Amino acid sequence: MRAAVLREYGEPLDVTDLPDPEPGDAGAVVAVEACGICRSDWHAWQGHGEWADDRAPLDHVIGHEPAGRVVAVGPEVERFDEGDRVVVPFNLGCGACPNCHDGHGNTCTDGLALGFERAAPGAFAERVAVPEADYNLQRLPGGVSFRDVAAVGCRYMTAFHALAHRAEVGGGEFVAVHGCGGVGLSTVQIARALGARPVAVDVDDGALARAADAGAEATVDASATDPVGEIEALTDGGAAVSVDALGRAETARNSVRCLRERGTHVQVGLTTDAEKGEVSLPTDWMTRWEVDWLGSRGMPPTRFPELLSMVDSGTLDPGALVGREVGLDEVSDRLAAMTTYDTDGVEVLRP
């Protein structure tokens, strides 16, 4: 199979031929029809994450948002057969630990992160192996295209879990979204679908226009105004929920400070080597106003049916966020474009 291999951090990926993966006794192999190109892939490509023991290895296939068809299954797999259309979550659970049994497989103590560690080669390839297929694979509704769910395995499900399960967003609540890349746009669209009132923040006119199309009630250009004061004015006192969808110290602090009393901040974006996982916060102010800080990573595989049913019904439309489709040879250029935030919504690999 053809695959894009990370040879050196920050250098073009090596598009080469590799042996087809094998499914393993409880696993499956999926022929990749589409795979999102996510900012987390950029972090892996840059060699970030060493401070959290989360650095992608070299000589490794990255990519973690695949959808495709099952082409092989192990002898222990019961729920899936060759030809099934599936989407793959990047947070792969073991299916047997207490967290997986309790519906929190995204924090599985023995879990794997697809494309980020040696034991789970990624999906910038024509085929990808998925362990514990019965637990991790998610059947794709018949009317939903592979292209449209290319980001569901990471950015879109992460946004859904952050709002629906972690922050438990309610109808009519203002939700501020800091950063309008793929996960930010997903957050805006999902917030609107959940009945909330999203306010999108970015410094790029194109990103803000996409956020408006995705359902933002208002947009804030953080290069032209103080986003905290602007959000307080737009929401008559501050947002009920705010999401840092970028992962910079500035956006994290702005997200916290734009909240109203007893508001909830959700951290989705991962930091760069400028922060190395550490951001200073106004903790006394947070204590005074009982502001909550929540982390959110991916989504438990067991919660996928509610998300996919909303996609199937048309209530959610992740395909509307897709701005570009590329081949394997173009992935390196699109990762480089992320360095200068020069991307177009959700960008999708079609191997």
Image: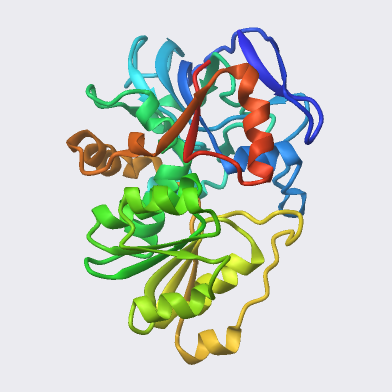
Left or right: 328, with 75 as reference point:
right
Residue nearest the observer in this picture, 194 or 18:
194
Left or right: 162, with 192 as reference point:
right
* The N terminus: image quadrant: top right
Residue drawn where x is 38% and y is 81% of the image:
233
Q: Position of residue 273 (x, y in %)?
A: 76, 54
Residue 276 placement: quadrant: bottom right
Residue drawn where x is 31% and y is 57% of the image:
191
Identify the colour scheme used.
rainbow
Q: Position of residue 335 (x, y in %)?
A: 65, 35
Residue nearest the observer in this picture, 325 or 87:
325
Q: Is any atom of residue 299 visible in this view?
A: no
Placement of 114 over or under 218, stated as above or below: above
Q: Position of residue 70 (x, y in %)?
A: 41, 14
Q: Position of residue 2 (x, y in %)?
A: 62, 10
How many callouts does the rendering have?
Answer: 0
Residue drawn where x is 59% and y is 84% of the image:
283
Left or right: 108, with 168 as reference point:
right
Q: Is any atom of residue 218 visible in this view?
A: yes
Residue drawn where x is 28% and y is 37% of the image:
308
Placement of 30 over or under 181, stated as above or below: above
Residue extending farthest right:
8
Placement of 32 over or under 207, stated as above or below: above
Residue extending farthest left:
313
